[in-house]
Image: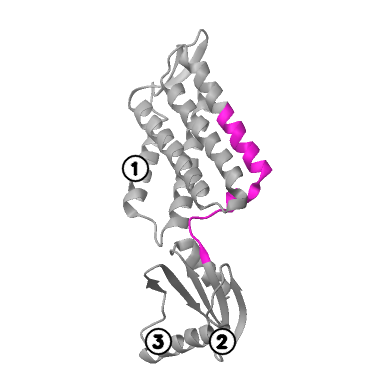
Amino acid sequence: SIDLYRASCFAATISTIFLFLFIDFTSRESVSPINIALISLLSGMVFILVWQENSIIFYDGFGYPSIKTSGIFAVVGNLVLLLNVLFYLYWALRISIKAPQKLRKSSLTFLCGTLLLLSGFFIWSAKYLLMAPIGIFFTGTGMLVSIISWVKEPKILYILPFKAYRLIVLHGKSGVPLFNYNWVEYKVDEAIYSGLLHALNNAIQILKRGSIKHILLTEGVLILKKSENVLVGLIADKTSKFLTNLCKSSTI
């Protein structure tokens, strides 16, 4: 029915918005206003045009009555779907690149499924009588391969686009280390490292110009978050809103 088709358009648009926000949230320190404006514009057009007369029509396309979009709504709707698929592809590529060695096989399987799904989308969008079943086959196979890779190794869904090296939690006043964890081996002694962070924090307090958000290094970044009781320091290869909020929540 047309109402069910409208519901699917809403679902596809909302999933595009959330997927975009997830990618930006985990990749950047702040969400790009240009990207937000573009997504908001396209989504708003979908939500308006979907109710317009003749935006969704019946036709005899593949030997049986079917439904499709028409006019401006067809252009905007296909563009939103294309963005959804491209965001999904970017996410799959990011997982494959950032995956550790033990998850490499599962991440590549997930990427192959995504590529099949992407191929099916383009073939299906061609709307040729012969190519439509092929597009459905590729899309279904791609979704099946992706789901199998998730079920077999759910850890690939938690791979994020950054690499953490060291996390340390200090007592806010004394500077005594409360927790320390290294993802890679460091030759710097824990006492020296914690003393350096505590001294740096005290020096900033003397200036009375707020606190340090992060320190950019040539090969990474040091993120600092402080509360009344604890000071959290995290060394990573890049910063993002997700990492900043994670450190902030650790100080509560």
Instruction: Give the number of the disc on residue 41.
Output: 1
Give the amino acid at mark 1: Leu
Foreground mark, 2 or 3, reads 2
Tell whether position 151 is magenta.
Answer: yes
Which residue is the site of mark 2? 191
Which residue is the site of mark 3? 204
Answer whether residue 1 is visible to the viewer in this image.
no
Q: Are marks 2 and 3 in contact (CB under 8 Å)?
A: no
Foreground mark, 1 or 2, reads 2
Which region shows up in magenta?
Answer: 141-164
**Residue at left 44%, top 62%?**
240
**Residue at left 62%, top 78%?**
179
Farthest residue, direction front? 187
Give the amino acid at mark 2: Ala
**Residue at left 48%, top 41%?**
88
Farthest residue, direction top? 63
Judged from the image, the secondary structure of the residue bearing numbered disc 1 is helix
